[in-house]
Image (spheres, helix red, strand yellow):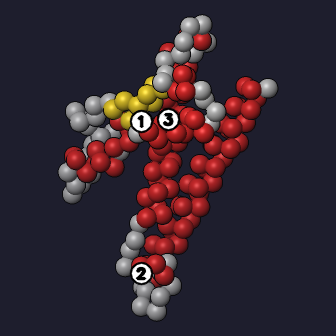
């Protein structure tokens, strides 16, 4: 993660001296119960694994006088945006890599059942929605705000 963080910040034009102010931390989620309780027929560890990225926290330590602008409340809001983007990317990855009996044919092979075709249709619709939500948040919200900050 450290290498990826350093490379991403360098590609984004962040000076090497400032890149050290960003860090990743892992919060302890092992003692937390899932929000809706454990699912029927699954163990607690399955529910935690599905939300494993929720323990990943991005931290920023602003130098003085930026501490006056980047308040703890603002940094907390930034962390929630980071967590939303991470959940969206994980959902997109999960939908892209899931496979069911129809294989790579996408439910259109000769031996596929109506249920398999329904599964692939649902997967495609969900993938389309998640992809466009992620694109909207990234391009129309975050990039637009970043450009307005730089102007």
**Label 3: which residue?**
6
Q: CA distance from mark 2 to mark 3?
A: 40 Å
What residue sits 46% from the left and 53% below the top? 91
Place of residue 27 in the rendered image (x, y in percent of width and height, measured from the top left):
32, 30
Does 129 sit left or right of 43 as displayed? right
Is label 3 in a helix, a strand or a loop? helix
Place of residue 12 in the rendered image (x, y in percent of width and height, measured from the top left):
62, 36
Q: Place residue 70 in its image quadrant.
A: top right
**Label 1: which residue?**
2
**Label 2: which residue?**
102
What residue sits 66% from the left and 47% below the top? 136
Place of residue 51 in the rendered image (x, y in percent of width and height, measured from the top left):
35, 44
Q: Place residue 131 in its image quadrant.
A: bottom right
Q: Place residue 16 in its image quadrant.
A: top right
Q: Nearer the viewer, mark 2 or mark 1?
A: 1
Q: Quadrant of the N terminus?
A: top left
């Amino acid at each position: 993660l450290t290498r990826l963080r350093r490379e991403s910040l360098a590609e984004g034009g962040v000076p090497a001296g400032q890149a050290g102010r960003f860090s990743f931390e892992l919060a302890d989620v092992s003692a937390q119960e899932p929000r809706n309780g454990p699912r029927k027929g699954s163990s607690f560890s399955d529910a935690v694994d599905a939300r494993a990225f929720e323990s990943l926290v991005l931290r920023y330590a602003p130098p003085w006088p930026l501490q006056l602008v980047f308040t703890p409340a603002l940094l907390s809001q930034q962390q929630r945006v980071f967590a939303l983007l991470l959940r969206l990317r994980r959902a997109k990855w999960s939908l892209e890599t899931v496979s069911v009996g129809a294989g790579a044919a996408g439910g259109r092979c000769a031996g596929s059942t109506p249920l398999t075709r329904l599964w692939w249709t649902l997967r495609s619709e969900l993938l389309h929605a998640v992809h466009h939500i992620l694109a909207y948040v990234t391009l129309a919200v975050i990039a637009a705000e970043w450009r307005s900050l730089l102007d």
